[in-house]
Amino acid sequence: FPSHDIVIVKVSCSELFIPTVFSPNQNGLDDALCLFGTNCLSDIVFRIFNRWGQLIFETEDPRLCWDGTFKAEAVTSGAYNYTFSATDASGSQIKRTGTITLLK
């Protein structure tokens, strides 16, 4: 029988990172709020709310970034609350809440 080499490739998942500040001022730097480290997550739900608790952004696609608009209008500078939930590769639930600061 021929000898076969076995190569084991270990794929590690990045740690989830949700930026806390971004500046959608069309200068080419931090113009959108994107999620990082979601490559091994499923069932993702990311929501952003204004200070009155109104849902202004929601996605189940981790590649979709928030551009700082609501109903095609730019929102004002300030603090926005978010919720994030997902399932990791082991089947565990991940839940995060926090605040994102939008600067212009």
Image (cartoon, rainbow, N blue to C red):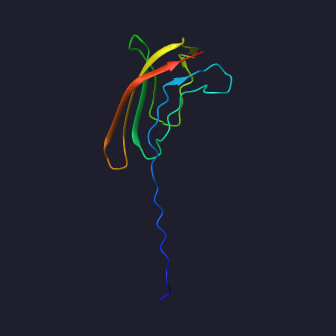
Q: Is residue 44 above or below residue 28?
A: below
Q: Residue at x 41, y 43 (%)?
A: 41
Q: Is residue 65 positioned above or below 14 on the image?
A: above
Q: Position of residue 86 (x, y in %)?
A: 37, 38
Determine the residue positioned at 46% across, 41% down. Answer: 38
- From this viewpoint, which residue is outermost toward the left? 92
In this view, the residue in front, 47 or 18, is 18
Location of the C terminus (image quadrant): top right
Outermost residue to the right = 27
Number of dots carrying numbers:
0
Q: Residue at x 48, y 25 (%)?
A: 20
The one nearer the camera, 55 or 23, is: 23
Q: Residue at x 41, y 14 (%)?
A: 54
- Determine whether 39 is above or below 99 in the image: below
Horizontal and vertical percent position of residue 45? 40, 32
Is 59 left, or right, of 93 in this rendering? right
Residue 23, given in percent of the width and then of the height, sits at 59, 21
The extreme bottom residue here reads 1
- Horizontal and vertical percent for residue 70? 52, 17
Measured along the vertical axis of the image, is residue 8 above or below residue 50?
below
